Amino acid sequence: MVCVRKSAMQWLYGTEQPPTLPRRVDLGPLGFDWYGETIRALSWNGHELVRAVSLVIRDEDWGSYAPTVVDSTLRHGSKGWEIEHFCRIEDHLDGSTLLDSRFSVRLEARSVVVEAVLDARRRFATCRAGITVLHPLHGVVGAPVSVTHTDGTVSESRFPELISPCQPFFSIRTLRHAPADEIELRLHFEGDVFEMEDQRNWSDASFKTYNRPLAWPTPYAIEAGDRVEQRLTIEIIDRSTGR
Amino acid sequence: MSASLRVQLRAADQVRVLPSLGCGLWLETFDPAFATRLGQLLRPAHLDLLADARRADWEARLDAAMALCAKIEAQAWLYLVLPDDRPEAVLERLAARLDGSPVAGLLLTPAAYLKSYQPDAVWPSGPSPAELLALGRRRFPELALGGGTPTYFTELNRCRPDPQAIDFITHATSPIIHAADDRSVMESLESLAHIVRSCRALAPGKPYRITTSAIGAWTNPYGRRLTPNDGLQRVTLSERDPRQRGLFAAAWALGYLAEISRVGGVDALSLASLGAPFAPATQFHPYPLYLVLEGVLRGSRRPALEIGHAGGNRLAAVGWHESSAKGELWLANLSSEPLEIELAGARVERGAALDLSCVERLCADFGSLEYGSWQEAPTIALSPFASLRLDVALADRAGPA
């Protein structure tokens, strides 16, 4: 029998594939961990406000694609940090390009703007392609939330305490809630119809706001040449100063 | 830079016991010789047998699995998937198999319910879990019959059993349905308290069994297939996650058990399987997960140590009383950063680490995480994803009342 010594990476993770490590991006009390097409642990003075914002591209069986990074930049602009991250999504089988994506993040003193642009190069079948926000559990479970719907109506509600089998909120345009004392968060969604799922069902430690209602048929197609554009604007309001 | 955390062993007002701790067994794929060997070494208190009656050889496989359970003295809990057509015929054949070798409990799942449906969607037209339960009740009036699913909490939450009609409630979890990066997988442990509380509310007072859960997904209720994986990729919805072979899975399993123990209310828990898809070993050598299971399965139904710590999602701590003054404590670093632990309320008498410095030696053969010499120090160091077994002397009032 040939004995091959395993590497430290293999003993830790069972694979030589290294874990993805983040780069911390901070601007005063506000900051996040940056991983390519995801930002995580958006926090204010160390208190987690948003667990993650990602560009998620699923295949027709809800499997994920591993995007190929084409270009990625982080630079300090006049008001804060700017990230631009370009990727290519390739077919699982033949490796041909299905779509090109741009994920951009702008971090300013009291706001984060995330944009996703997808350009389909071929007819592309997917269960979901767009911006997904994960809300943490601490400070959120059972807490009040104000939901502005796409038709402009506002519901004053609460995040579920026990795990909800169905989506707690539909047709979301804007969410307002207070994940930390003194901090009010406003999340404004554009570019598709968004709704929220109680991800604790699947043992994820989060609620998830995602594009395209689950009641619509899946998989669905993005036609060759079509462009998808979505935007999330997160505003942090310090309730002690009202700013 | 390592973070410093304090772990406090406390006196308990009420002594709680750890759940019955077992493993899963997939009837389609298990190798009786290997599973028997693993079972004899690990001594799980129970085995959750997952069988699919749509397979031609399921009865012979069930006989072999029941023989295995008898040999290793593990309770057998049968999770049987039934064809949507003529399930009564399967129950008749099952009765013949169980005559003389009864199972401890039985969950009947219509094959169509291995898929997930939104609560307001069109549900399968065949028999529902409730209808199979009623059929099972007529055929097996003496047997404990469950409600729930062999898949994930979602499917249970969307198809809730009548709590009055069931003898136990059950589901599994998988941490790689939506995300498969290391951070998300460890963060998933934070959701377990919510799942337990929500599941308890669905069937108050009924025994609650979390069936075989591991870093992996054995089936995909949301699509046609699992994600193809050569066993080296961290991908969602895969039954071949590489971390199962690493220290990562050992720490994750301790994190799972620690959280279930902390929250309470779970009567049985199955981690890993004796064979595919979630084996803790190959035929030739164990994975780190094996060494943790070999230790903690001995804690099945033992009085739990009351442990407090502010380690959040970075540290797992779980243990049980060996006597009023002694306990066995297991710690795991759930992060990729080193940790320093200060232990209060107890003194370490002996210890054994499972970390990068010794994992190769320890995984050379099917042994135990044996205590070695222990250097007394003010703090205990835990390297990334390390697990630690500690023999502790409890301070006054830390023992069971």
Image (cartoon, coloured by chain):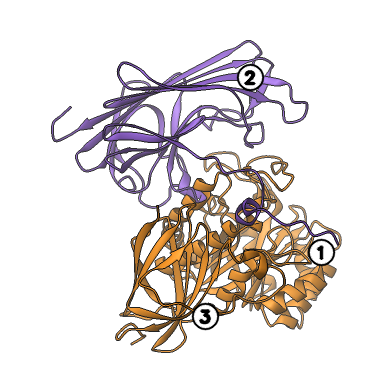
Quarter of the view holding residue B52? bottom right
Badge 2 amino acid:
Leu
Which badge, 3 or 1, comes first in the chain's sequence?
A: 1
Residue A165 makes an appearance in the image: no
Q: Nearer the viewer, residue B398 or B127?
A: B398
For the C terminus of chain B, the quadrant is bottom left
Which residue is found at the position 34% from the left and 34% from the top?
A: A31
Residues behind callouts 2 and 3 on a single chain: no
Residue lying at the far left of the rendered structure = A241
Residue B156 makes an appearance in the image: yes
Residue B242: x and y, percent?
66, 51
Disc 1 to disc 2, C-alpha distance: 45 Å
Which residue is found at the position 62% from the left and 74% from the top?
A: B294
Q: Which residue is mark 1?
A: B58
Which residue is found at the position 47% from the left and 63% from the top?
A: B382
Q: Nearer the viewer, residue B161 or B280?
A: B280
Q: Chain of mark 1?
A: B
Q: Identify the colour of chain A in the image.
A: purple
Residue A42: x and y, percent?
36, 36
Query: Badge 1 local density, few (<14 within 10 Å), some, or many (20+)?
Result: some
Quarter of the view holding residue B212? bottom right
Badge 3 amino acid:
Ser
Q: Nearer the viewer, residue A133 or B319?
A: B319
User: Which numbered disc covers residue B373?
Assistant: 3
Could you say whether the residue bearing mark 1 is in a helix, strand or loop? Answer: helix
Supply the letter of whichever chain is orange: B
